[in-house]
Image (spheres, rainbow, N blue to C red):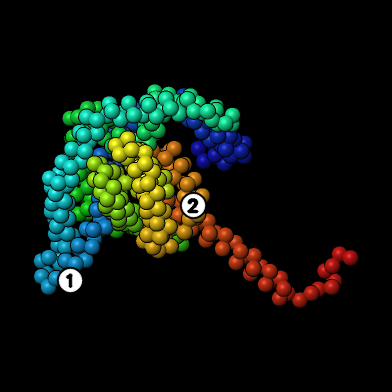
Amino acid sequence: MNRFFQSRFIRQMIPYFVLAVAVIIAFHIVSEISVLFGFVSRVWGIVIPFFYGLILAYIFNMPCSAIQRLLKRTPYKVIVKRSRPFAVLILMIIVVTLITLVLNWVIPAITRSITQFITEFDSYQLQLQDLIYRFNNLNLPEFLQPIQPIYLDDIFDMILEFAGGLVDGDLVATVFAGFGGVAGGIFRTFLAIVSAIYFLIEMERLHAFSVRLVGAIFSEKNKAAILKYCGKLNFNFRQYIYVQTIDGLILGTLMTILLLIFQSPYALILGVMLGIVNYIPYFGSIFGTIIAAVVMAFTQGLGTAAFASVFMFGLQQLDGNFIQPKLMGGSFSLSPLLVIISVTVGGAYGGMLGMLVAIPIVALLKDILDSYIEYRENLKLEKAAITEDEPYDDSATWL
């Protein structure tokens, strides 16, 4: 057998044989791609609750770690030794308390606002039809006439298409539509919450195991680079979640107060909506402000809505240009154009979740690219300096 492999002809044919086997395997994979996708889809359907549990654990790990640091300062050795489980328990108590307060105060107020809006929806629809009719009968200049006429059904279809594009691939859509019924959704939601609790308890061990795994696979140099950029990505996500949460609370509260000043019957629900959509950079607050202005136009008249819109957009600009940058503290030094492109691409490929994670990921990619450019520039400067230090050799010239 050894003589067989030592043959020169056989050694020359081995690469071609390996290539032929690879082509056959690739052909079978492509021909059975639907089976492969089906298998991946089934596996994803099984692990998706744990995936969302890991996301929840990652988000709640920030306050949990802060509580743990406080517990480690206590003089009681039992608490210090088991600070992580105690921190998770305290966090669960805080979350359950907040949920109870929301269910007993915020949800009823929002429910009343939604019920009132549904009850008066017919009158709002008639107002919109009247407004469209008057617009279609305006004598507009020739360059504006192509936008006429406008039909109510087209507006509703456009709104539904836009909303469908936003929730495509979203967590809510996946939980309630992709789990195959309410019972399955409840079970998987419960499984995600339970797994999130265990992920929280084991977060430190998971981190230590991940570091060991990277060290076992990669060299020390590559390990240091991977851990460095993973740390930066982790910092970006934590900073983004923190900033957007605080900024959403500030903007939602200010908008609610502003709408209450204008005596809007939907001040609370609109303020909560503005705080939530603020997680989407640039587009979120603008989109929420437009919705608030439209709702005010139908409920309180165009004059009040126009006057309030000036203050709402002014508040939105104040938040985008002063409050949010102060909270960011230069963590995401991205141009507005890059942010818009990032959010658009993230939404196209990942839905709402893609929009939320686009900014931290792009910030890391920009940091890596800046580091690479700086490395190449320094390398060129070093080569130029070495060339200048070399003595001029007249005999080495061609002419």
- In-front residue for pair 158/366: 158
Residue 335 is left or right of residue 96, and the answer is right
| Residue at position x 64%, y 65% in the image | 380
SS class of the residue under badge 2? helix
Mark linked to residue 73 = 1
User: As drawn, which residue projects farthest toward the right?
Assistant: 399
**Quarter of image, res 17:** top right
- What residue sits 29% from the left and 54% below the top? 254
Q: Residues within 10 Å of mark 2 (few under 14, many from 20)?
A: few
Mark number, residue 365:
none
Quick one: SS at disc 1? loop
Q: Earlier in the sequence, mark 2 or mark 1?
A: 1
In the rendered view, tell whether residue 162 sits above or below residue 378.
above
Left or right: residue 9 versus residue 217 is: right
Examine the rendered structure and indicate whether residue 369 appears above or below residue 80. above
Q: Say which amino acid is labelled 1.
A: Arg
Give left or right: position of 114 versus 356.
left
Nearest the eye: 316 or 11: 316
Check the image and report above or below for 340 versus 134. below
Q: Position of residue 250 (x, y in %)?
A: 30, 55
Nearer to us of marks 2 and 1 is: 2
Residue 27 seen in the current view: no
The answer to whether residue 68 is visible is: yes
Q: Is residue 137 left or right of residue 205?
A: right
Q: Amino acid at mark 2?
A: Pro
Q: Which mark is residue 336?
A: 2
